[in-house]
Image (cartoon, rainbow, N blue to C red):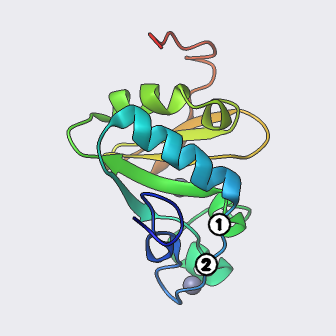
Amino acid sequence: MGDLSQHFSRAEFACHCCGDLKVDPKLVEAMEELRARAGAAIVVHDGYRCPAHNQNVGGVSDSEHTKGLAADISIAGLTVQQMYELALEIADFKDGGIGVYDAGFVHVDVRDYAARWARVRGQYVGIQHLIKEPVVNA
Ligand SMILES: [Zn+2]
Ligand SMILES: [Zn+2]
């Protein structure tokens, strides 16, 4: 039992540099849904980032992380592809942002429009033109 929700704690979402925390309830709900679908623990690598920390890690200036709307996650035993497809099953992530990273994690956020991208060898690349309507066996 976490102190943020059933499976998540505030510490997991707090900024790595200063411990500040901003997290939207919609993100927490979507994360719980994702966890239920995964049936496995979700590791939160990055949740809220204060603007200074966001800049230090090279995040885009208006990063959803600075708004408490985003998390970078991985799920034990799942590939990036599997995590991506699982995230698509959650409405708030499907209608929000999902990014895949070759470092082996997935970014999910609950912004109010769909966005997809990948970061490969340090470069951000758009993938929406490739997978406009991804096929998912929901
Ligand atoms: Zn900070
Ligand atoms: Zn992220």
Disc 1 to disc 2, how far (Cα)? 6 Å
Counting from the top left corner in percent of width and height, residue 51 is at 67, 78
In the image, residue 49 above or below residue 70: below
Label 1 close to label 2 by CB (< 8 Å)? yes
Q: Where is residue 36 in the image (x, y as percent from the top left)?
A: 42, 38
* Three-letter code for the amino acid on which mark 1 is drawn: Val
Q: In which quarter of the image is residue 98?
A: top right
Residue ID at (44%, 25%): 85
Residue 17: x %, y % from top left = 49, 86
Residue name at image x 50 percent, y 33 percent: 87
Q: Is residue 100 shown to the viewer in this render?
A: no
Where 41 falls versus 116 (above or below)? below
Left or right placement of residue 75 versus residue 128 in this view: left
**Is 88 positioned to the left or the right of 103 in the image?**
right
Q: Can residue 96 be seen in this view?
A: yes
Q: Give the number of callouts.
A: 2
Q: Residue beneath label 2, please?
A: 21
Q: Residue furthest left?
A: 77
Q: Which residue lies furthest to the bottom in this view?
A: 18
Q: Nearer the viewer, residue 8 or 120?
A: 8
Image quarter where the N terminus lies is bottom left
Within 8 Å of ligand 1, the CB of disc 2?
no
| Label 1 CA crowd tier, 10 Å (few <14, some 14–19, many 20+) | many
Q: Position of residue 60 (x, y in %)?
A: 65, 61
Q: In this view, does 129 lie above or below 43?
A: above
Question: What element does badge 2 sit on?
Answer: loop
x 34%, y 43%: residue: 102
> Can you identify the residue that label 1 sits on?
23
Q: In this view, does 8 lie to the left or right of 59?
A: left
The amino acid marked with disc number 2 is Leu
Badge 2 crowding class, 10 Å Cα cut-off, few under 14, some 14 to 19, many 20 or more, is some
